[in-house]
Amino acid sequence: MDNASLSRKTPQASELAADEIPEAVRDHPYLEAGGSQSKKKGLIWKLVGLAAVAFGVSIWLHLNFNFFPATSRAQPTQKNPAAATLAPGSAPSPATNSKAATPDNLLGHLPYPEAPAADLVNVTSDGSIKLRTSAAAKYQEMANAAAASGIYFAPISGFRSVDDQQHVFFDVKAERRQNASKRAEVSAPPGYSEHHTGYAIDLGDGSSPDTNLSPSFENTQAFKWLEANATAFSFEMSFPKNNRQGVSYEPWHWRFVGDRQSLETFYKAHSLKK
C-alpha cells in the first residue's frame, strides 16, 4: 500500500474510532479531569474532617488535663473579679483565695502549738510563770528597764498548757454560766490560746493590783510605759481595741515577736485568717 492510500485511510480510521467512543464521553471532554477534581475534593473533605477531630481532641485534653494552659491575662469574672489585675503567670495572694487558705479557727481564736517543756524558763522567783528562753530573756530586759523608771510589772500568767486552758475556759465558763461564744470573748478554748506558745504574758501594775486583767489596766503607769517602750524589746499587745479577731480588748496581754520562730507562730496564723 502506497502512502497516498494510507493517507486516504487514516481519516476513515479516525472517524471509525470516534464513532466507537460513547456519545456521553464525546459530549464531555473534561469528564475524566472532573473525576480527578472530585477525588481531590474528597481528599480535602477528609483532611477537614481529620482536622476537626484533632481540634476536638485538643479541646478535650485541655479541659481534662490542662495540656494547653492559657498564657494570656486572666479575664475578670463574678467568681474571680481580681483575676484581671494578675500578671501572666502570677499566683493569687492569700487575700484573693482566702477560703482555700483559711485555717481551723474556733470562735475567733487561732490554733497554736504547745511550747516544748525543755525551752521554758522561769520569769518569777517562785517558778509559777514561765516563758520560752528567747521571750524570757527579753522580758527580763524590759522589766529591768521599766524598774529603772520606777515602774514594776506584776506577771500574772505566762505559758499555759492545753490542760491548764481546759480549766480556764470550761470550768470558769460553767462557774459564770457563760455560753461558749461569750466565754471566747475573754478566753481562748484549749488548743487556741497564745499562752500555749510560751511567747505570751499577762502583766499587771505592781502598784495597782485592782486593775489586773481589767480594761482599766490601760490607766496605769505600767501600761503607759509598755505603750511607749514595749516594741523596743519586741513585745506587742495581742488584742487591742477593735481587733480583727473579735476578742475583747486586753491591754494586759502582750506577746513576744523578737525571733523567727515567734514571728512565724503569730503572723503566719494571722495571715491565713479570714
Image (cartoon, grey):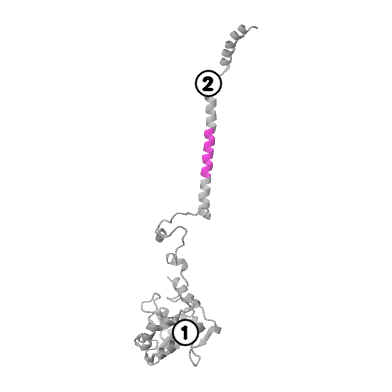
Q: Is residue 183 magenta?
A: no
Residue 148 pos. (x, y %): 41, 90
Relative height, residue 177 to residue 36 (above, below): below
Residue 174 in view in this figure: no
Q: Identify the magenta region.
A: 40-53
Q: Main secondary structure of the magenta part?
A: helix
Relative height, residue 42 to residue 271 (above, below): above
Instruction: Tell me the residue at 44%/71% (across/down).
Output: 271
User: Closer to us: mark 2 or mark 1?
Assistant: 1
Residue 155 pos. (x, y %): 44, 89
**In 3D space, how far apart are the residues under numbered discs 2 and 1 (Cα atoms)?**
110 Å
- Asked where in the image residue 169 lies, by quadrant, the reply is bottom left
241 sits to left or right of 67: left
Q: SS class of the residue under badge 2?
A: helix
200 sits to left or right of 221: right
Residue at the farthest left position: 219
- Of the numbered discs 2 and 1, the one sitting upstream in the chain is 2
Residue type at tag 1: Lys
Residue type at tag 2: Ala
Q: Which mark is residue 24?
A: 2
Residue 41 in view in this figure: yes
Q: SS class of the residue under badge 1?
A: helix
Q: Which mark is residue 138?
A: 1
Relative height, residue 47 to residue 172 (above, below): above
